[in-house]
Amino acid sequence: MKKVALTAAVLALGLAACEAQTDETVETNVEETGEAMEADAEAAGEATEAAVEEMAAEADEAATEVEAEVEGETEAEAAAD
């Protein structure tokens, strides 16, 4: 009977130790996941900002080209008159 009680006590201690490690592991994984999500969100924000700046630059360039074409047509019309 003493062997059974001792075995049960040892198993209970082992289970408690595993449970504590599991809780720590879960907490660590949650923290690491949160940090990774923050880093991903920051990288996505930076990529989005860069893409918006690139699109704005392309729009400015296209507007400049259109403006130059319109002015060129106006000059050609003035020369024809």
Image (cartoon, rainbow, N blue to C red):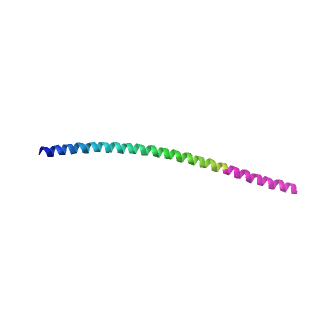
Q: Please tell me whether residue 78 belongs to the stretch shown in magenta.
A: yes
- How many numbered marks are there? 0
**Residue closest to the eye, 12 or 72:** 12
State the residue lying farthest toward the left: 1
Q: Specify the quadrant that holds the C terminus.
A: bottom right
State the residue lying farthest toward the front: 3
Q: Is residue 44 left or right of residue 15?
A: right
State the residue lying farthest toward the right: 81
* Residue 16 in which image quadrant: top left
Residue 41 screen position, x and y as percent:
50, 46
Tell me the magenta residue range.
Answer: 58-81
Q: Main secondary structure of the magenta part?
A: helix
Residue 18 screen position, x and y as percent:
28, 44
* Residue 73 in which image quadrant: bottom right
Residue 12 screen position, x and y as percent:
22, 44
Which residue corresponds to the image point at 79% horizontal and 52% vertical from the top-left?
71
Q: Is residue 53 left or right of residue 17?
A: right
Q: Is residue 14 left or right of residue 25?
A: left
Which residue corresponds to the image point at 20% horizontal and 43% vertical from the top-left?
10
Q: Please tell me whether residue 68 belongs to the stretch shown in magenta.
A: yes
**Residue closest to the eye, 9 or 61:** 9
**Residue closest to the eye, 22 or 66:** 22
Which residue corresponds to the image point at 32% horizontal and 45% vertical from the top-left?
22
Residue 76 screen position, x and y as percent:
84, 55
Q: Is residue 51 left or right of residue 14?
A: right
Q: Taking 4 as reference, is 79 above or below it? A: below
